[in-house]
Amino acid sequence: MAEFDSLRQAHARAGAASQARIDEGLRAYMSRVYGIMSVGMLVTAGAAWAISGLAVTEVNGQQQLTELGRLIYTTPLRWVIMFAPLLIVFGFGAMINRMSSATATTVFYAFAALMGVSISWIFLQFTGMSIIQTFLVTAAAFAGLSIYGYTTKRDLSPIGTFLIMGLIGLIVAMIVNLFVQSSAMQMAISVIGVLIFAGLTAFDTQRIKNEYVALASSDSEFLGKTAIMGALSLYLNFLNLFMFLLQFLGNRD
């Protein structure tokens, strides 16, 4: 009996030590995910601000588009800039297994820079203060939703499937409204977009956490790639949440 108790205690200690290693690894992994995502957001913000500054000039006290501004905002190139990030996301997901984690990180930051060019128009249409305020609101909301997704014991998988289906419908509606140009439809898209990406933030955080627990024994190179894909998911959630909230909170310049 004493030997059995000793064996059981040894197994319990081994299990506790193993769980402690997983918890420590998870914290480091999530820090890496959020770190990559945060740098990506800084790259996007820097690229958007820089391009917007090069796209306009002041003539006789009035702002006018420069040659660069006319090229990226008024010519067919604007459609390429608009849809190229979406194509890169799909291509990145399909090809990441063929890349090293270092290459994948570089591609992610290049994508973030291109996304900055794609959304640079916001600095021409909204005041700088309202952009900053909306960013802070988005950051607070994102943090709360991500903490919920990380800590909740509730399985968010069922709502994840529903949200992804809603996202597909949202993308279709956004493409249609590019041609219809309905203000009422744009308002509905913005409301639904905020709800979808708020839910996806919590869902993706839980998914990223669960993926690490399931793959904790994998090699560091593989985990590095999954961290980048996790960062990409959260980056897209944050950026889209910000863009949709800007439609409500942003003041037109």
Image (cartoon, helix red, strand yellow):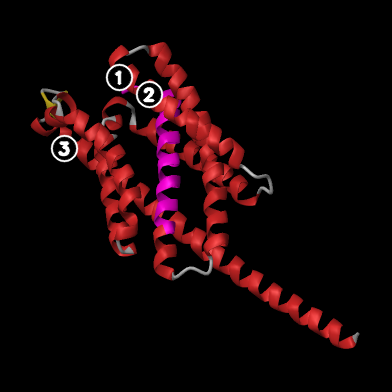
Query: Does residue 158 appear left or right of residue 125 in this picture?
Result: right
Residue that badge 1 annotates: 178
Of pointers 2 and 3, the one earlier in the residue sequence: 3
The one of 24 and 63 positioned closer to us in this rendering: 24
Point 22% across, 42% down: residue: 50
Amino acid carrying mark 1 in the image:
Leu
Quarter occupied by residue 122 = top left
Q: In the image, which disc is placed on residue 172?
A: 2
Q: In the image, which disc is placed on residue 54?
A: 3
Of pointers 1 and 3, the one earlier in the residue sequence: 3
Residue 57 forms part of the magenta stretch: no
Magenta stretch in the rendered image = 226-253
Amino acid carrying mark 3 in the image:
Leu
In the displayed image of the protein, which residue is found farthest to the bottom?
3
Q: In the picture shown, does residue 140 fall above or below 219?
A: above
Point 33% across, 43% down: residue: 90
Quarter occupied by residue 99 = bottom left
Query: Does residue 245 appear left or right of residue 162 in this picture?
Result: left
Amino acid carrying mark 2 in the image:
Val
Give the class, few, some or many, for how many residues have Cα within 10 Å of label 3's Cα (few <14, many ≥20). few
User: CA separation, marks 1 and 3?
Assistant: 25 Å
Residue 238 forms part of the magenta stretch: yes
Of pointers 2 and 1, the one earlier in the residue sequence: 2
